Image (spheres, helix red, strand yellow):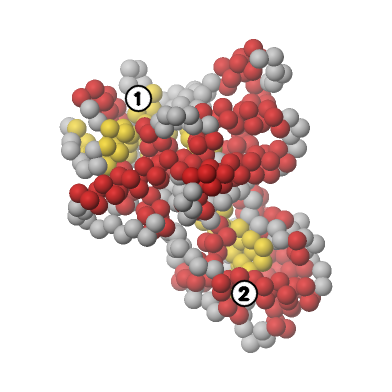
Amino acid sequence: MEKETLKRAILDGQEIFSSRQVIPREHSLKWKEIKRLEKVIAVVGPRRAGKTFFLFQVMNELGLERLNAVFLDFSEIPLQDFAAEHFELLFQAYLELFPDHTPWFFFDEIQEVVSFEKGLKFLLNRGLKIFITGSTSRVFTANLASALRGKTLTTTVLPLTFREFLRFKEKVVQAPVSRRELAEMHNLLQEYLLWGGFPEVVLVDSPDLKLNLIRSYIDSMLFRDVIERHHIKNAALVESVFLRVLKSFTKEISVHRWYNDYKSMGLKVSKDTLYQYLGHFEEAQFVYLVENMLGGSSSQKKIYLVDNGLYLRVRGFDEDWGKLLENRVFNDLQRGHSRLGFVKGSGWDLDFVSGSRAVQVSYELNDQSLRREAEGALRGLELPAVRESLVVVQEPMEPTATIAGVQVLPYWRASIEGVL
């Protein structure tokens, strides 16, 4: 790798930074603290969630001048020969370009560089600030923390929350809201529940283009994060299992039943292989497996998707609004990083237990569903460590009931007010 090539890459990256328009995402990073820390800030999350643009947001919020920012995307062809020993050369190239400035490094797709940890250590030892994005694999995060011996701080970028979705739609919501605003909120929420929160999908209007984008995300994830990463030869079986996962979201799954189904179709596949595939999907952060908190690790698990839009790959004519709302509430709750599970008792169930709170989800409340949700919400208060219970609904759009002291709250309000 020649120094002149790196100089061009530095200048190209600065031009990209200065030309990007960024819609801010929510995060919990404290810049005063970050500036004091001698750590690599790792931005992780599933594909297409917006990690690269988050780097540009960080540059803006830090108030960096163009000349101080070094942005390199290691997935680009000019940098395909970059190796660990070239980090020192990169630093020298920057100092020759801007001898009176101090660089902040922003490395996109860092996993493309073999043994990149050694290069990051070189820069850290010189007191330089480093932000990286990397593989979608959770294993990447664990390996990075181990290699850098506690010198990393991780922040996660996921598909948009509903509050962020409204910002992308340039919609400002302030209480109280009028009937017209409620009707508009209803339409926006249905769009969000159906199409999900991948930023690129949210920003396009054409349904056909939205669907094509989602399909491309799935194809990329399956090939790069599962088939290629784990050297799987039977790509057709991987896709078949993933489509079954999509159809099963919010449901308890039985790998034994899946195994029997494939066996009856004359396909040779073991239960261990099916478990491995599920693990690969979860590792790639497109799927979550959630335990029954009363059943233990051996009980059947529920499947949730990182974004509702993935379900469009297999959706028929029925939108399944109840499942879409439940999947969305799950994603909001799991951002809190507290232990999250569901409860299936004898004759009753509870959608989620998150920390000290029980959460029940119902698309709409009527006399029959009110009784069912009430029982789950109230039984949740009997569980150890649970101190409060909440019922989240989509319809009606305004709270109309309190179940024995349990608040009923519309999803849009719970999301905007940060209740979830």
Q: On the rendered structure, is 43 left or right of 32?
A: right
> Residue 15: which numbered mark, if any?
2
- Mark nearest the camera among 2 and 1 is 2
Confirm whether residue 387 shows in the render.
no
Viewer-side residue, 296 vs 81: 81
Q: On the rendered structure, is 369 left or right of 111?
A: left
At horizontal 51% and vertical 24% (from top left) the residue drawn is 253
At horizontal 55% and vertical 79% (from top left) the residue drawn is 65
Question: Which quadrant is home to the N terminus?
Answer: bottom right
> Residue 349: which numbered mark, if any?
1
Viewer-side residue, 270 vs 182: 182
Q: Is label 2 in contact with label 1 (beta carbons under 8 Å)? A: no
Picture quadrant of residue 169: bottom left
| SS state under label 2 | helix
Tell me which amino acid carries mark 1. Asp
Where in the figure is residue 191, as x and y percent of width and height? 39, 44
Residue 224 against residue 96 in the figure, above or below: above
Q: On the rendered structure, is 76 left or right of 34?
A: right
Where in the figure is residue 104, as x and y percent of width and height? 60, 73
> Residue 231: which numbered mark, if any?
none
Residue furthest to the bottom: 100
Residue furthest to the right: 2
Q: On the rendered structure, is 105 left or right of 364?
A: right
Residue 420 against residue 76 in the figure, above or below: above
| SS state under label 1 | strand
Return the disc, 2 or 1, that comes first in the chain's sequence.
2
Viewer-side residue, 231 vs 76: 76
At horizontal 55% and vertical 57% (from top left) the residue drawn is 51
Tell me which amino acid carries mark 2. Glu
For mark 2, does the 10 Å Cα neighbourhood hold few (<14), some (14 to 19), or many (20 or more) residues?
Answer: some
